[in-house]
Amino acid sequence: MSNGFKNPLIRLLRVLPLALVWLVAGCGGGASTAENPIVTPPPPAGYTGPPPASQDVQAFKLNVWDNLQTSNRCGACHGSGGQVPRFVRNDDINLAYEAANGVVDLGNPGASMMVTKVGGGHNCWLAANSACADQLTVWIRNWAGSTLGGSRGVNLQPPPLHDVGASKSFPASSGAFAVTVYPLLSQYCSRCHSSGAVTPQSPFFAEADIDVAYAAVRAKINLDTPADSRLVVRLRDEFHNCWTDCGTSAAIMQAAIQDFANRVPLTQVDPNLVLSKALTLYEGTVASGGNRYDNAAIAIYEFKTGTGTVAYDTSGVEPALNLTLSGSVTWVGGWGIDIRGGKAQGTTAASRKLHDLILATGEYTIEGWVAPANVVQENAFIIGYSGGTTARNVTIGQTMYNYDFFNRSTTTGANGTPAHSTPAAAEVLQATLQHVVATYDPVNGRRIYVNGVLSTQPDPVAPGLLTDWNDTFALVLGNEVSNDRPWQGVVRMVAIHNRALTQAQIQQNFDAGVGERFYLLFSVSHLVNVPQSYLLFEGSQFDSYSYLFNKPAFISLDTAVTPDQVPVGGVRIGVNGAEARVGQAYIPLDQTVMAAGYNIGAQLGYPLSSIGTVVALDKGPAADQFFLSFEKIGSTTRPRTEPAPTALPPPPDGAPAPAIGLRTFQEISASMSVMTGIPTTNTAVTDTYNRVREQLPTVENIEGFLSSHQVGTAQLAIEYCNELVDDAARRAAYFPGFNFSSPAATAFDTPAERAQITGPLLSRAVGTGMTTQPSATEVSTEVDALIGRLAACGAGCAADRTMVIVKSACSAVVGSASTLLQ
């Protein structure tokens, strides 16, 4: 390589023309291509030119050139004698390296011209352009040397500046949609896009329930420019399911959308508001995967495509282990899939890379961001590499509140049993989004981490080798390959590593979060005397119907500036020209940005709040324009008075108001403390209370009762009773005379013995003299029968379960309606 290329400026001047030529010449244009996977990695002997001139050139060859030089990727056009830039030429790797440097950005691989060209449809070798772009980003990032120790960094970019303007928003009622667009969808699209179709395909915008269809179609309609609506584009440009010639079908659909849009009034911006500049979600800086540790990742699924029947492996490790979606599986907005009895499965041939690469190290990690649909599923498999119900290499499953970890080794059978599970009493599995990581190595065996915390005891099975793994099995999500271990829930991300990640690396990935997230920079430079100043939010599409705003901070992108003494207060989020009607969690915010707390390195600017909020999706992430309004910022103060809450309407038909209500979360815990004698400050009780508090009632109105209230109440009751019965002194005082050392088969034989349990519970937790509720006798009979059923388990249950039965009876009484209602 010439010495001139050691000078960055000279290097830039020599490669820039190549980049410009590529922009206008391009090979293959934007035409769609068939998927052309490489079955095996390119052979090392594929290059016979001069050796690499430096370690950086060698890194380029191993990570980029080797993956792109084949004829079904870039080799057919950008090789020796082909179109410039010739970054996969095979006559001289050093000249290929020079050419590649003009079309990559090693500091921000995702912004590389090479990536944006392929992502825009230029000769993508997969069926989805975004998947090609993701793979290429990984290869360029690997070339860059993983300068953050295998992690992905985040570089904030200033967004374009938009003033907040009048806009159209979807009306709350589906009435206008029902008489304009819906008739076309119902007539021509219901064979696929409805839940009752033979082969249902989401989104269900042709559903028989018009309100459901309306909610599903909003992201497919552009109220401001109907011609750009996805419903029109699919007909006009992609020739999808046209009912006459596609031009005519598209024109009919566009006219219907225009008719709908004409019925929607413009939302005018309140001129009295103090406003930031505006931006859309996609004008933010991508935050997803920021600072993740992926150095040993051999398969990654981020579910970015959002359509179709393939979830792409974007790890960049060949061959790509793509998953085919089958059965009841739908895409989730903001990246993810919702599995409700279906599955996502790879081929046995592509899955073999897991076998080969994991056996090469003898250890591995399976990482997932999952949200179980409920906590009653049993024998349900979430992630597995298996051959059926009797043979597997590894499986992560669910049994109610527990995660189960099966691993096949030289110390287990072919089915990887016994499972290593999270402790049942801890109830770490919850029906909410969780980061679940299972690691295995021949020293520590199996470990499960939930939300960054080690959640299992030491593995009871001695660690072994993985030499018995079977290379004919397949990777599957949400079920067994034989379709008889269904799991229900949402999967937002899965990664498989051929190293056992450390606690620090797992915590790093947990902190990085998941999903399609962006750093939204709302410009306020026009409101404060700080150059390049912004209010930063972490924003994401929370689900198909809402956005999540989180972690607001004040920041300046001018690194020479340290903001100081900048007041910020009364912040509201606006969407499409109007403040959001719900989700305004930052109205109470009242902060002053101080130089002492400002840090652009360890954190992003000056934190303003640690809470998040959810606001409704309107037009969809590509079209919804967000802004902020302020009661106070810098030297500007515009105090506002919130309108009085709307009075509740009178009961319909003169029905009387309910005479009973719900206890709120504080009252429920305090009541259980009195019932059991366990203080609310008990450590185990406090941990459970903090975990389930959001499931408990927050208001006393009985009409606000939800099933989650009862579930949370039951969990808290179990913990109070667990602490009561496990304490020898407390249980002896609470249940005087009962022999806890007796085996379960005889401890509850007589009515008198059972009364030693039911009597104290009824007097402490239910009371007597009930009038409108069941009588004390009826309650006693019910609890007595419960004890009898539990005690009669027979030889299939442990003999020393007497205390477990007492805990169950206690939990049934303490967690009943006598506690929840008042």
Image (spheres, helix red, strand yellow):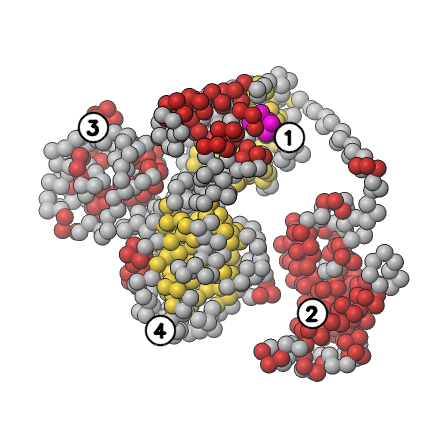
Q: Residue at x 44, y 71 (%)?
A: 417
Residue labelled with disc 3: 18
Does residue 628 appear to the left or right of 306 in the view shown? right
Q: Residue at x 74, y 60 (%)?
A: 816
Q: Marks 3 and 4: which is nearer the front?
A: 4
Q: Nearer the viewer, residue 548 or 231?
A: 231
Quadrant where the N terminus lies? top left
Mark closer to the chain start, 2 or 1: 1
User: Which stretch appears magenta?
Assistant: 171-177
Q: Is residue 139 on the magenta stretch?
A: no
Q: Which of the labelled discs sits on residue 410, or is there none? A: 4
User: In what element is the residue under mark 3?
Assistant: helix
Q: Position of residue 690 (x, y in %)?
A: 65, 54
Q: Nearer the viewer, residue 366 or 239?
A: 239
Q: CA distance from mark 1 to mark 4?
A: 60 Å
Q: Amino acid at mark 3?
A: Leu
Q: CA distance from mark 2 to mark 3?
A: 75 Å
- Label 2, residues with CA under 10 Å away: few <14, some 14-19, many ≥20: many
Whether pointer 2 and pointer 3 mark residues with C-beta atoms closer than 8 Å, the reply is no
